[in-house]
């Protein structure tokens, strides 16, 4: 159990996190994005403004709730969702690939016909249950003041993306960003942002992922993250990693997707050697958060998945 040792120096980083946030979002304070206005199954139009003045595009968008791809993930909003905090778990919204897992070609016409800006598509896989479970874990395992509710982030919403230094996304074989979104995400990363990308399996999904990733950072290589990297040690020592299976795989679903797969922890570094994209390929970290309270789901997957997420957040906020 030695490699699960939690380092005291890793969790006592509140001051450093605050500095990192301030440096990243000069126009707005991270964590100020929860206006308390909840929209169900609709995209919010942005912060309320006085008179006829348009909303300030640099300000954080208010908290909003979208339809989940998974009906049972429509969970209650935590009572303290309006709390102003140092860290907010932000989830990247994206349009789906026409050949993605939940596409018309795979027999999911009802899903494919939805407007991605209203939710209910690939970007809402695991959302919001996984997000809120992970926020709870951040509160219990670190001293980082974390909001109990997530923040969906649409790259088309003006400069809102720059208010959230950490972004996570899943089902990466399904994303298909537009040219404007690609430019926005590229600028986000080069200005100090961090992407945690998860839950895609096999060569076909990897190739679909690369269609967009190569356009975002065409000059940067995707490499295997070596064990000595700080991201595997900043809070928890995670040298002994193993594949994290999704709940769907444990019940035998989509065997062609995962049988024989080999887990990888890959990443992209910027010119200064800072990891800006962390990729858990042939893994399902999202399910390890989503099902962390399910007694049937193996604890060992949630144990590793939560620790990976905690390390990613602390690395992103201090590098």
Image: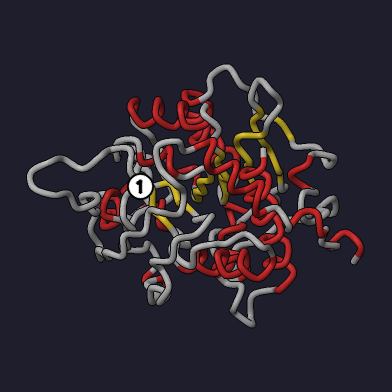
Image point (59%, 41%), residue name: 20
Front residue of 162/121: it is 162
Mark 1 neighbour density, 10 Å: few (under 14) some (14–19) many (20 or more): many
Residue found at the very far bottom of the displayed protein: 295
Q: Secondary structure at mark 1?
A: loop
Residue 285 location in percent, x, y? 61, 57
- Residue 259 appearing in the image: no
Image point (46%, 38%), residue name: 25
Image point (62%, 50%), residue name: 313
Front residue of 302/160: it is 160
- Residue 145 appearing in the image: yes
Q: Residue 138, located in which quarter of the rendered image?
A: bottom right
Residue 130 location in percent, x, y? 52, 65
Q: Which residue is under mark 1? A: 60
Residue 233 location in percent, x, y? 80, 49
Residue 302 location in percent, x, y? 67, 67
């Amino acid at each position: 159990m030695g490699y699960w040792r939690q380092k005291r120096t890793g969790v006592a980083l509140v001051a450093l996190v605050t500095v990192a946030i301030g440096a990243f979002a000069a126009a707005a304070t991270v964590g100020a994005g929860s206006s308390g206005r909840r929209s169900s199954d609709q995209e919010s139009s942005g912060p309320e403004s006085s008179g006829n003045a348009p909303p300030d595009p640099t300000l954080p968008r208010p908290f909003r709730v979208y339809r989940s791809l998974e009906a049972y993930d429509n969970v209650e909003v935590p009572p303290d969702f309006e709390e102003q905090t140092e860290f907010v778990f932000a989830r990247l919204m994206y349009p789906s690939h026409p050949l993605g897992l939940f596409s018309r070609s795979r027999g999911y016409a009802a899903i494919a016909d939805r407007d991605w800006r209203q939710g209910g598509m690939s970007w809402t896989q695991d959302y919001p249950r996984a997000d809120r479970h992970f926020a709870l874990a951040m509160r219990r395992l670190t001293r980082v003041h974390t909001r109990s509710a997530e923040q969906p982030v649409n790259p088309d919403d003006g400069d809102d993306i720059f208010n959230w230094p950490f972004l996570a996304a899943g089902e990466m074989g399904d994303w298909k960003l537009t040219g404007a979104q690609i430019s926005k995400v590229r600028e986000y990363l080069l200005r100090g942002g961090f992407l945690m990308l998860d839950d895609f399996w096999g060569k076909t999904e990897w190739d679909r992922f690369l269609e967009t990733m190569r356009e975002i950072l065409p000059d940067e290589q995707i490499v295997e993250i070596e064990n000595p990297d700080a991201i595997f040690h900043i809070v928890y020592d995670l040298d002994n990693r193993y594949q994290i299976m999704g709940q769907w795989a444990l019940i035998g679903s989509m065997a062609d997707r995962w049988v024989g797969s080999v887990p990888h922890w890959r990443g992209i570094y910027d010119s200064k050697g800072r990891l800006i994209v962390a990729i858990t390929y042939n893994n399902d970290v999202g399910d390890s958060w989503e099902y962390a309270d399910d007694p049937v789901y193996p604890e060992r997957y949630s144990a590793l998945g939560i620790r990976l997420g905690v390390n990613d957040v602390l690395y992103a906020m201090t590098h």
